Image (cartoon, rainbow, N blue to C red):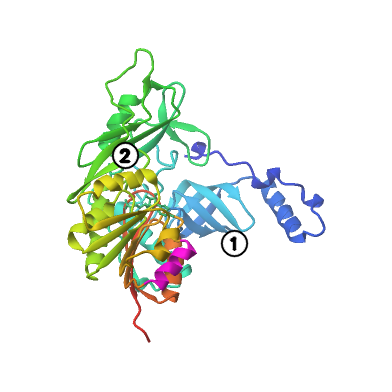
Amino acid sequence: MSDEITPEAPEAAGDAPAAAAPPEAPARARRLRRRARLADQPRIPIEVELIGLAAGGRAVGRAPDGRVVFVERALPGERVLAEIKRNEPSYIEAATVEVRQAAPGRVKPPCPYFGQCGGCQLQHADYALQLELKTAVVAEQLRRIGRFEAALLAPMLGMADPWGYRNHARFTVRRNGDVGFMQQGSHRFLRIDECLIAHPLVNQTLRAVQGRTMQTAQLSVRVGEHTGDVLVQPRLRWRPGRSRHLASGQQTYEEELGEARFRVSASAFFQVNTRQAERLAALVLERVRAAHPQVVVDAYGGVGTFAALLAPHVARVLTIEQSAAAGNDAAVNLAAHENVERRVGSVEALLPELEPSPDVAIVDPPRVGLQPVVVQALINSRVRRLVYVSCDPATLARDLRMLVDGGFALTDVQPVDMFPHTQHIECIATLDRAAAA
Ligand SMILES: C[S@@+](CC[C@H](N)C(=O)[O-])C[C@H]1O[C@@H](n2cnc3c(N)ncnc32)[C@H](O)[C@@H]1O
């Protein structure tokens, strides 16, 4: 495995020599001297005992000199020999080259590209262990960043069959027509003939295009698991003598979740795991409906996913979405629901002044989480229940702390595995307005 890994150039290599540091910056000079010393050290693999899993999917341990080490392709409870990839004064990044003592849940990664393409970080753990480890990552972020007790956290909900789920893949295309991914942390291209987490229709499309296309550097494939629709962008040009009957250049495709059918534009967001998105949406709906709302706001509403599923069950829904592409899809997807109103623009600008004011809110922001103005608008609003869908437990923990300090109480956090075999973590957090003391 070791020859798969190219140690990166020492970080200090491009820095000024420590002796040239200006006298007014002694701390920086010390840091540079230390880095230069570390960079001089030969990159001998180190033996590490791993004690936990960090956000990002790497196991954590201590180096013999006491520094924290983040190790790729290792698991808590293991002892591994790891090759150093990055050597910093306060931490080390490394990758497993030999497992000296394996954890009980270690398995042989089924994908031949695992450890090279960088899309999956956890294929070396059996699926039950992945769920356990990712739940522990959420617990740790809630505790460390949000100062919340683990008791609020439910175990992550996994998939019955955690393979072939990804309905969207973005590939790189070389001049010779080879299709694949860029290797993690490098500019090296890796040709891919099958991706085990991608939906079979994505792999079928990959096989049809592999080695046959030209004049594009990117290829995006999106599929509707329930509709069989395929969207391939851009419109492909075929290498001489290699043309295929494969439609490409579609502007939209369709997918179904539960009772609703959605049109999705090439550039609009849609959940990448259809089966788990249905589950996620059902859990969100359950939490919203339990509060018997009058007016629900679906902020960061995308193509209208939650709003369309919710509309038949509540009196009134307002959606907020800033992307024009997603907004146009939402206009189509929500057209049949007279009790849904769309607001086009940023949540930051629209939520503080929203009329009629909602009593229940759904927020589903990108990874950066909520801007402070949005947190404040929620605190100042008459929202009684807030359902927060998050794809980053660190920003979730940060925002939950601000919301709780502002008068909400955290009722529960439910992680849902939308991204099996990868480091990524999705959670639904429910908050209720705390009773006045
Ligand atoms: C994680 S997606 C969720 C979409 C939708 N809830 C779903 O499940 O399909 C986030 C959505 O928020 C939109 N968005 C991002 N930042 C925004 C902002 N500041 N104001 C309004 N919408 C925003 C994006 O365009 C995207 O559609």
Viewer-proximal residue, 23 or 363?
363
**Image-based side of 147 in relation to 283, left or right:** right
- Vertical order, 437 against 368 (above or below): below
User: What is the C-alpha distance between the residues marked 2 and 1?
Assistant: 38 Å
Q: Main secondary structure of the magenta part?
A: helix
Residue located at (42% from left, 65% from top): 352
Q: What label does residue 196 carry, if any?
A: 2
Viewer-proximal residue, 284 or 149?
284
Label 1 element class: loop
Q: Which residue is mark 1?
A: 66
Label 2 element class: loop
Residue 185 visible (yes or no): yes
Viewer-proximal residue, 224 or 303?
303
Highlighted range, magenta = 371-381
Circle 2: is it few (<14), some (14-19), or many (20+) Cα within 10 Å? some
- For the C terminus, give its image quadrant: bottom left
Asked if the residue at tag 1 contacts the one at tag 2, i.e. Cβ–Cβ closer than 8 Å, the answer is: no
Total numbered badges shown on the rendered structure: 2
